[in-house]
Amino acid sequence: MFAAFSTALSALDANGVAVDVVGNNLANMNTTGYKESVSDFRDLVNECINGGTTQLGFGVQSPLTIREFSQGAIETSDGPLDAAIQGSGFFIVNNNGATQYTRAGNFQVDANGNLLTPTGEQVQGWMANAGVVNTGGPIGNIIVPVGSTAPPVATQNVTLSANFNAAATVWSAQDTSSGWSAPITVYDSLGTSHVLTFNFENAGNNQWNYTITMPGSDVQGGVPGTPSQVASGTLAFNADGTFDAANSTPPGNQVVIPAITLSNGANPLNVNWNIDNANGTGVLTQFDQPSAASANTQDGSAASELTGVTMGNGGQLLASYSNGNQAVVGQLALANINNPQTLLDVGNNEYQVSATTAQPAIGLPGTGGRGTIVGGALESSNVDMATELTDLIVLQSAYQANSKVVTTVSTLAQDTTQLIT
């Protein structure tokens, strides 16, 4: 009979621990990336009496707590550096030399550009070198280039999409109506802009003469106020209005403009005029429509300042510059752990490996069983309030029932004592 007393006490202790677990889950319902814990009850060894025909249990052990790493809801956030993991894996952080893991992606940048968790741990990944990220190398601290300036990029290639009016009159000194032009802004090695003007005149027989000029003040030896010619030639078209590369002068789909020596001391400007798209289709046509340019491109840029850094999908850190360009400056790493339930909770939404944890597999998101990263979003807690409240009611009932066992055994003990006296 008196064994029931200790049995009920063990149940009170176990149910009290389970209530603590539920309370902690409910307290972290709104904690980013939090994973709920569940209580796993286990009975104690039985005592055999009456020659083994009767087994009496000694109660219940203090429950184990097991983390449930199920997916939390992905919600869009306002933080430019926020990231959420869709699928398996953990972000990797450095806490004063100790490697830890987290599902919470509410990151921020300090005054030195270090990408940190809200509690100051350094987020791990790979930094870009000249715009290229080597994800095969070791991971390290991610440092955002705060206050940096992107160097200028000299223009090397230009394209011009345009139509030449097939019904235009042949250009002459008396009739210049077919002449038209299209300006394209390019940049030199110092980031200074220059305007290349493409001038066209109908030469008849499905051909158009062109000259390319730059302001005389920009060219070494040029005359201010007078355009300096830097290239010339002839564009030929087929009877169906498509570009005829073979009969153009010079022939081919690319015009190499001779190096332009600039008056501002920048490196000579070497520009190629590409008449084809990347897929090999021409961008110049001759149809019975007004002559006009529809688009142009060039691959140079002026020097620019960093205006912001955002987290892109896939975990790429994208730097935006004042000239409108974007560049990849870093890449988050993910760790896949086959048995995450063995991780030890160290607080601050972070975990560390235990003696039974499998070796974390670190790599690029979306590879090797690792989940993907959604930029500009956060993973919510996976705690379900309805489930937790239901569990709380069940535990309360179990606690009350075992309390009744204690009072019953106490009453029986008092009755036994009265029989002796």
Image: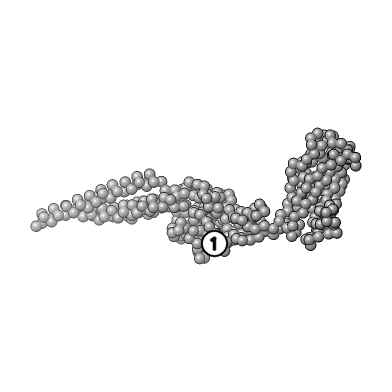
Q: Is residue 37 visible?
A: no
Which residue is located at x 29 percent, y 52 percent?
Answer: 11
| Residue 204, horizontal then vertical, whole percent | 89, 38
Colour scheme employed for the rendering of this structure: one colour
Query: Judging from the image, what secondary structure is the residue with disc 1 in?
Result: loop
Looking at the image, residue 76 sits to the left or right of residue 286; the answer is left
Image quarter hosting the C terminus: bottom left
The residue closer to the viewer here, 421 or 119, is 119
Q: Residues within 10 Å of mark 1 (few under 14, many from 20)?
A: few
The residue closer to the viewer here, 233 or 420, is 233
Q: Is residue 223 above or below residue 165?
A: below
Q: Is residue 179 visible?
A: yes
Looking at the image, residue 101 sits to the left or right of residue 59; the answer is right
Q: Which amino acid type is shown beneath numbered disc 1? A: Asp
- Residue ranking furthest to the right: 173
Q: Is residue 360 above or below residue 383?
A: below
The residue closer to the viewer here, 297 or 23, is 297
| Residue 116, horizontal then vertical, whole percent | 53, 60
| Residue 187, horizontal then vertical, whole percent | 75, 55
| Residue 33, horizontal then vertical, whole percent | 47, 52
Give the labeled residue for mark 1.
Answer: 110
Looking at the image, residue 420 sits to the left or right of residue 216; the answer is left
- Residue ranking furthest to the bottom: 96
Which residue is located at x 52 percent, y 50 percent?
Answer: 78
Which residue is located at x 47 percent, y 47 percent?
Answer: 72
Mark count: 1
